Amino acid sequence: MHVVILGNGISGITAARFVRKLSDYQITVVSSETDHFFSRTALMYIYMGHMRFQDTQPYEPQFWKKNRIDLKRARVERLDAGSKTLHFDSGETLAYDKLLLATGSKSNKFGWPGQDLKGVSGLYHYQDLETMEAYSPGLKRAVIVGGGLIGIEMAEMFHSRHIPVTFLVRETSYWDGILPAEESQMINRHIRENGIDLRLQTGLKEIEDDGTGRVCAVITDKGERIECGYVGLTAGVSPNIDFLKDSGLETNRGILVNEYLQTSLPDVFAAGDCVELRQPQPGRRAIEAVWYTGRMMGETVAYNIVADTAVNRQPSTINRQRYNPGIWFNSAKFIDIEYQVYGDIQARAPESHVSIYWEHPEGRKSVRIVYDKNTSSVLGFNLMGVRYRHEVCNKWLREKTPVETVLQNLALANFDPEFFKTYEKEVIAVYNRQSGRNLASKRQGRLDEVIQFLKGRAVESRG
Amino acid sequence: MNAHNDTSLSIAQPHGLRLSAKVGLGLVGLGLLLITAAWFGAKLPAAPGLLAVSLILLAAGTVIHARGLYLHLPEGIKNNGVWLRSISSKGAVAWLIGIVLTGFYVLLYWFPQYLGLGSKDVPNSGLVAFFDPLSRLLNGNPASQWFVYGTLYTVAILAMGYKFILKYRHNRYQVVRTISVMFFQTGFAFLIPELLERLNSGKPYFDKDLKNMWPLNYDFFFDWHLGNLLKGGNFGLFMLIFGVAMIFLISPILTYFYGKRWYCSWVCGCGGLAETAGDPFRQLSDKSLNAWKIERWLIHSVLVFVTLMTVAVIYSYLAQNDGKLWIGKDAFAWGTAAFFLVAGGLVFAFRKRFEGLKDQTAWLVGGVSVIIGGILLINTFSDAKHILFINSFELRKVYGFLIGAAFSGVVGVGFYPLMGSRVWCRFGCPMAAILGLQQKFFSRFRITTNGGQCISCGNCSTYCEMGIDVRAYAQRGQNVVRASCVGCGICAAVCPRGVLKLENGSTDLSARTDETRTIRIGKEGVSLL
Ligand SMILES: Cc1cc2nc3c(=O)[nH]c(=O)nc-3n(C[C@H](O)[C@H](O)[C@H](O)COP(=O)(O)OP(=O)(O)OC[C@H]3O[C@@H](n4cnc5c(N)ncnc54)[C@H](O)[C@@H]3O)c2cc1C
Ligand code: SF4
Ligand code: SF4
């Protein structure tokens, strides 16, 4: 049984590791990007000098040999599902019994004039980092187009090297499609506090050629011309599936898969950024291009690949697993402000969502807890500059815990380092003011309490 | 230029240094210049004042430099450009500093006369003489090379500690911890012993640093030291009892509650220097599995070595003083053997209670039996001076040379810019080895991982000075319980996703290292915990 995995990102590699744990099959991982798996999320830290490329690789080179995972560096040009073969650009082929497509994303380009000039690039692949590096010496200004997570990372990257940055954001406030207004404005302030030229409600009209095929300026939709030697296109990503168009695979924006992560073709699975779920779980999107879903899909699909094989049709088999990512969580860091989210936090929340929002007077930390007006059960947590425990929030959300119970036990969620000032009292005070209640914190948040809570004991607060 | 665009707000490259940061460096340079001039015998006017001036230049220069470096920037992690600068990425500057430091340690340990150390008839000269006034002021005697070293060491911890505090000023754990090491170095390691020396000036020398524990302080049980302690009156006796209590009582209790960090990154002087002056080099520690393997062999061998040597030395001491003390040499040897047998046996008997024990049981029990065997051999074959046919004085000389000087000093600090700041603590320190064993098997301390939030970026592993691959645990949702972790908390500080927290708890003592996968596949789908 030969399992071939196309893509050595988090999805493909997690799948490979679990197929190895669950079976003895031959495993080959194919990728054109790098020899070894690295953490895409850490690309920025290489450029900023926090780490070397090798530091972003979670496994040492000998890991692959030890676990009998064969690595192949090659670009796949075509999938022939009929004969179950991959065709490489070198002309070579590779036959598979089971195939996993984990090809990730590519940066969006929206047909801007000049978008293919030299010095214009997204930030997704390792090669994009090399491009940034090549254009950095002597660079007078970089313009970044698109105010999402990758955009702000790119702004921080150039900024770390003293390269002036202009950051064009189409929306009225940074990432305000996802972040509620207060948090979004906090990040606006923070971007400016760092000396980055943030232009809100400003889009890109065109990129100018200096006559040699290289960028020399951008023109915004407000008609302003900004001279620059580099343009970063960070207006989102989309599934990287162009080379699969003629393979007979059913695709929409991404590769369509069912709840077992099976594609429309026999023996072909898909996982990660490149996937579009036919039926996402309620409250989740069909395409979720984040690290965590890639990792969860990778693990799930490994079970399904192994469960799906004839070799495995004996008693004591490994069972198929439905992909169910559970409750949404995510995190990021906006320059120096850490961000964590658990559950359902919406930028423009429906009327039934009530927010308890506390912000530190210095404006670099905040806690938002959202609950349902009618049932009063907790719906989500949005944290800026404060760390909360994933497991604790997850349990509250899963059990639809009443918001007052959550508040009284809020100290259990705190995950900030020792000696940090805690803010449970302040958050509860906001709620008391809003609701005329008089709640008080009932916990210290000691680890022993937390573990007991998670193990299901002492669910109700004492006293 | 646009008003919203201040590029000096980033600190990636040296050319971005603000004027005050440069001035600070200049003052440090001036201080070093003065000290060097004194060393080479320049006729300096008003030397006592000049010593003060140069020490103040070193400290104030560092303070000004640090303020220029950090204060104008928003609070947060300041690792921009670490791998782009020569000094922090094993470049030419790093080699230069490494060689100078190593050279200084070689002179310090083996050729103090070149630093200007005098003898009975010859007064101090050069560098050592330059420090005479301060030494006289504190302890009443002329300086020794160790006084020079202790003073510079303390100044380094204070000045670089200040820099560290500014760098991590958003993180109270780091601030509190650093104030602690600065306090213990200045008070317990430097001022108090010097002043006590003055008060006890009639009595023979013994160590007066309360926090300096055996086996880091390996000569604690040497015959001359035991003898001097016993001749040291009430205070000497107190130091003896306190020293023994530290090893067998105080330190195990504190380690049980807080992990070895209470010592290694809050109190210890070696740790103090590593955390402050060594901070710019923490990323250089080797994270490979191979390095981990070497570490375990090396550090535990040193532990076995120091234990054997100490037992041998005490044994010869007792043999020479047979009948004069309340314990005889045979009773001591058999008592020690019994102690190790019982301790080893207990660990072995309860190994099931400890998750992480499996792979290490072999060498642990092995190490213990080597010690016991060694002791028995001593008793059988030795006269007062010879242990295993080796002279116990030779044994201690070898230890002092190899471990006490070459490893802990020359390699330990000299190689900061090339191998990271904790080479000694990680590969050599027998104190760290003992505390590490306690931390691993019997402590409430662990680093917890925050569910599924890890993005495997590698910042934690990169900035772990002990070379622990923290990410390997974090990315699969496992707590970190490692013997070598000194609890510096930097992994938790640099993590961009808020994944790590240093915690103490007794609820699941034996299951601390359970592999809780971040994501668990079950009937209800993928879930956490
Ligand atoms: C700068 C940046 C920062 C990010 N930060 C975060 C974050 O903080 N948190 C978060 O949750 N997510 C983050 N993400 C998103 C996250 O990195 C992705 O969701 C995740 O890496 C996707 O993993 P994957 O395995 O699905 O695909 P990828 O990692 O994209 O792996 C796919 C691999 O397949 C290769 N490949 C594709 N097609 C072919 C072919 N035809 N032939 C050969 N090889 C091929 C690609 O070259 C690539 O190496 C970030 C992304 C970027 C770019
Ligand atoms: S694991 Fe973390 S706390 Fe422990 S030594 Fe390493 S960086 Fe410090
Ligand atoms: S624990 Fe934090 S620093 Fe370490 S790899 Fe995970 S996200 Fe990165």
Image (cartoon, coloured by chain):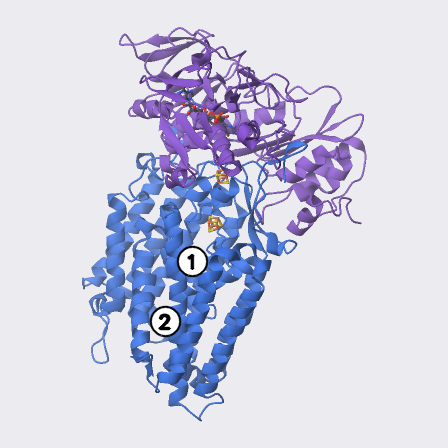
Chain colours: A purple, B blue
Instruction: Indicate the secondary structure of the residue bearing disc 1.
Output: helix
Query: Is residue A302 something one can see in this rendering?
Result: no
Residue that badge 2 annotates: B137
* Chain assignment, label 1: B
Task: Tell me whether marks 1 and 2 sit on the same chain.
Answer: yes
Mark 1 or 2: the one toward you: 1
Classify B263 as above or below A25. Answer: below
Quadrant where the N terminus of chain B sits is top left
- Residue B522 in picture, x, y percent from top left: 65, 35
Amino acid type at image mark 1: Gly
Classify B195 as above or below A417. Answer: below
Amino acid type at image mark 2: Leu
Residue that badge 1 annotates: B271
Q: Residue B155 lies in what quarter of the image?
A: bottom left
Disc number at residue B21?
none
- Residue B388 in picture, x, y percent from top left: 33, 79
